[in-house]
Image (spheres, rainbow, N blue to C red):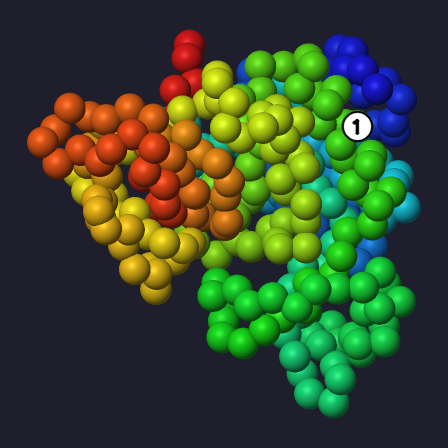
Amino acid sequence: MKVKNHRIDSIWHKQSSNLSAGTIAPRLIVTHYTTGWSGTGSRDWLLGAAGGSDNTGTSAHVVIDRDGTAWQIAPFNRKAWHAGKSRYGSLSGLNAHSIGLEFVNPGWLKPAGDGQWIDYYGTKKTTAQLEQFGGFVLQPHSTVGSGTFAWPLFTNAQIAIGLEIARAIIAKYDIRAVVTHEEIDTRGWKTDPGPAFPQSTFVDLLNPGADQEGDPRYTVNTTRLNIRGGPGVEHDQVDPPGYLPLGTVVSVLRRSGNWAFVEVAETSGQPDAPEIGVRGWVHGGYLDMDFGD
């Protein structure tokens, strides 16, 4: 696959009516799930009037169906409406800086009793139906609520074509990070693409070997950033140092939702600066990445 004139020439394309005027220089790839069961239904919805739907508020760049079919619905240099209110490092309003990949998947389903599950829109499925759909994992998620939820698996065909598309994008543009919608969302309610999605596989396209020299680094942008033993405020602080002071430079080794597992790479020069090499979890919203000019 190759990107030519901001399109992948080997896949179907049609332009969504839900795009902003002007062009962008993409720096990020954002992964999403569609919160739907139908590939063509999701595609046509995100195409807006161009797909015969009454959707006037959302779009993306590519929709990837469960059988590996992919549809490009926006040129990669156009601003699509997939990220909403968002921030990553020093960038905000990420529709203006990113390419959105939508993977067809309904997202979480809550238990509804008697072996049934109910999705975001109220559609009920039995455990047998979810198995037939491709299986699922059971995982808690505090954003959805208390308890454990079913997260349908993505298919091998879907992931394979998604990786091909991501490789083509990375080869063409100055992409600095591959991120989830959940980790960039500043409203605190997005969960896509969820725990069933192999996000690390996509991240590794850009950043193979998390500890290698030359990895992107981030700077702490708040006075005291707590560093914890796990991804959440319920985990104790790593002591010492307990927190990272303003200006501390870290490498991100992996992510879990809004949280980042980091290693201190450079200290801020303050008396309470941590030792280089200290590792722990911090909230990713307090890390700035240098995106250059």
The single residue placed furthest to the bottom in the displayed view is 114
Query: Residue 87 or 241: which is nearer the viewer?
Result: 241
Give the amino acid at mark 1. Glu
Q: Is residue 39 above or below residue 73?
A: below
Q: x, y percentage for residue 88?
A: 43, 34
Does any portion of residue 275 appear in the rendered image?
A: yes
| SS of the residue under disc 1 | helix
Q: x, y percentage for residue 58?
A: 62, 43
Quadrant showing the C terminus: top left
Q: x, y percentage for residue 257?
A: 50, 50
Q: Which residue is drawn at 55% across and 68% down?
A: 140
Query: Residue 271 or 145: which is nearer the viewer?
Result: 271
Q: Residue at x 67, y 59 (%)?
A: 107
Q: x, y percentage for residue 71?
A: 82, 34
Quadrant showing the N terminus: top right
Q: Residue at x 74, y 81 (%)?
A: 116
Query: Residue 212 or 27: which is nearer the viewer?
Result: 212
Residue bearing mark 1: 164
Mark 1, Cα crowd under 10 Å, few <14 / some 14-19 / many 20+, is few
Does any portion of residue 56 appear in the rendered image?
A: no
Q: Which residue is drawn at 83% across and 55% down?
A: 38
Name the image quarter holding residue 77: top right
